[in-house]
Image (cartoon, rainbow, N blue to C red):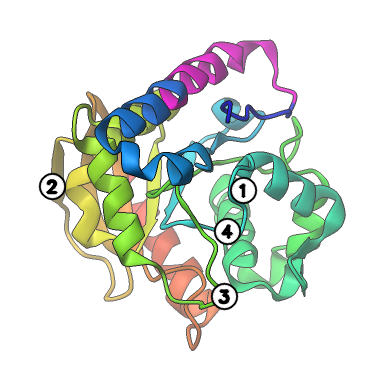
Amino acid sequence: MPLLPTTLVYPDAETSKQEALRQLFQDWMQASIQAAPEMKELIEGMVFDGFYPHYFSRRPKILFIGREAREIEGFNYLDLLHAAYRKGKRIGSQHLNQNLFHRRLLYTAHGLLNGFPDWRDIPDASVIGDTFGKPDGVSFAFMNLSKFSNESDFWPSNWKMIQDAVRLATQQRRLIAEEIAILEPDLVITMNLEGCFPSLGEEVTPLAATSRDVSAWRLTSHGHASLLLDSFHFSAPGKRDLEHFYLPICDAVRKHLT
């Protein structure tokens, strides 16, 4: 199965970054097959990711890191989600405004890119999506720690598959750290991934805490330095958008990045 590139249209200034990611992902797939030929079928269905158009002109440049894709084996993550944000307004059977994970992504990114507005002034996720990836809209980078798609009907993360993916991605090269370095984020937001920090870079140094909900770190990935914040997983039930995500993330960014 050939590597499936994104069909999104990028400004000229970002095409070299797209090419760098395309080559990285090609190497990633080949290295994984060489390391684990018995997993060839799974590897050929890897779901690759990266950044949305106009990400590199945003300040701060925000990279979200999740765990794994769900039920999109062989597809390009960016294409599917860009279409869902901009036009479909649905994630599976859920409206975008009701989906915890993607609603929180869009709310948080909008706030960080627009000067920390009050929560009540942030538009609905569906409205943010109208201009997502446009020159005047929200844009960010997104990558999953695992490039394998969890095709199970069960909602918990498949940690065995995630660990296999991380092992293959760090066996010969530090491919996860290389992807982060290509994306050059100012801010990396991970989702309850502290146990996986060694795969993100060669150095992760703790910074002074700002809340019990978000931890702060200085991350160096293949020579690129960024602020790393680890929060609850964005799909975590029983957590509140404002108190557990938006406010502690904004507070940490104010303290360590602005």
Question: Label 1 amino acid?
Answer: Asn
Q: CA distance from mark 1 to mark 2?
A: 28 Å
Q: Nearer the viewer, residue 189 or 28?
A: 28
Residue 140, horizontal then vertical, whole percent? 57, 41
Q: Are marks 1 and 3 in contact (CB under 8 Å)?
A: no
Residue 202, horizontal then vertical, whole percent? 15, 35
Decide: is 193 above or below 87.
below
Q: Which mark is residue 105?
A: 4
Question: Label 4 amino acid?
Answer: Leu
- The residue stretch that appears in magenta: 9-25
Name the residue rendered at 47%, 43% in the picture: 41
Judge from the rendering whether residue 53 lies leftward or rightward of residue 116; answer left or right. Answer: right
Q: Main secondary structure of the magenta part?
A: helix
Residue 133 falls in image quadrant? top right
Q: Are marks 2 and 3 in contact (CB under 8 Å)?
A: no
Q: Which mark is residue 114?
A: 1
Q: CA distance from mark 4 to mark 2?
A: 25 Å
Q: Secondary structure at mark 1?
A: loop
Lower position in the chain sequence, tag 4 or tag 3: 4
Question: Label 2 amino acid?
Answer: Thr
Q: Are marks 4 and 2 in contact (CB under 8 Å)?
A: no
Q: CA distance from mark 2 to mark 3?
A: 37 Å
Name the residue rendered at 46%, 17% in the picture: 23
According to the picture, the residue beneath numbered tag 3 turns out to be 153
Judge from the rendering whether residue 18 lies leftward or rightward of residue 67; answer left or right. Answer: right
Name the residue rendered at 41%, 39% in the picture: 40
Lower position in the chain sequence, tag 1 or tag 4: 4
Residue 215 covered by magenta stretch: no
Mark 4 Cα-neighbour bin, 10 Å: few <14, some 14–19, many ≥20 = some
Q: CA distance from mark 4 to mark 3?
A: 23 Å
According to the picture, the residue beneath numbered tag 2 turns out to be 205
Decide: is 184 above or below 253.
above
